Image: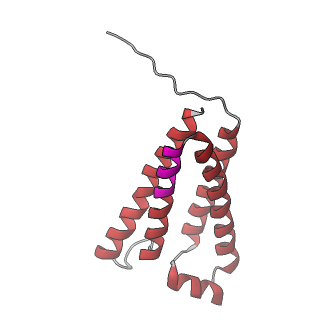
Amino acid sequence: MNSFAVTVAWVLAALLLGPTLLGLVQNLLLRETTLFIATTAHSLFYLATATGFAVVAMLGAKSSVRFMQVLGVVYILISLFEFVTLGSNVANFQLSTVQTGLLSNVIHLGLGITIAGAGWILKNCQCRMIFINRRA
């Protein structure tokens, strides 16, 4: 069992809760005065992603790796779609549902590459978490 893949899945679950909470607080308090405009749909997508990572981490390494591979590709495809449609009528329709901008597209592309890369690297990795017990 690749316990490192499970650890990475737990870390990604925790990290993706940040944009969820930030998006919900931003929507309630700051509205449209910030750099990122996150709609409730955007925040719920991040919440679903974080929940997905937590579920696959509990299922084990194989599920975690497969989820990273699939979700990474989905993020890459979404970001490429966002880049292609930025400023068009399709983007205006998309922006009414999940508001994005150039900075969000770059972040989504980076997330996709990172998550998919982790999935493919950890697929054949025999990584183990090593804990060194040092007694004083």
Residue 30 quadrant: bottom left
Range shown magenta:
51-59
Spot occupied by residue 56 in the image (x, y as percentages of width and height): 53, 49
Q: Is residue 70 left or right of residue 46?
A: right
Q: How is the image coloured?
A: secondary structure
Spot occupied by residue 7 in the image (x, y as percentages of width and height): 50, 39
- Residue in the image at 70% along x and 76% along y: 84
Spot occupied by residue 78 in the image (x, y as percentages of width and height): 64, 69
Say if residue 124 shows up in the picture: yes
Residue 128 quadrant: top right
Q: Count every numbered label the image shows and give the total.
A: 0
Per the image, is 56 magenta?
yes
Residue 9 position (above or below residue 76): above
What secondary structure prevails in the magenta region?
helix
Spot occupied by residue 104 in the image (x, y as percentages of width and height): 54, 68
Residue 37 position (above or below residue 59): below
Q: Residue furthest front?
A: 59
Q: Quadrant location of the N terminus?
A: top right
Q: Is residue 119 left or right of residue 14?
A: right
- Residue in the image at 55% along x and 74% along y: 101
Per the image, is 62 magenta?
no
Say if residue 39 shows up in the picture: no
- Residue in the image at 54% along x and 75% along y: 100
Q: Nearer the viewer, residue 120 or 32?
A: 120
- Residue in the image at 51% along x and 60% along y: 49
Q: Quadrant location of the C terminus?
A: top left
Q: Residue furthest bottom?
A: 89
Q: Residue furthest top?
A: 136
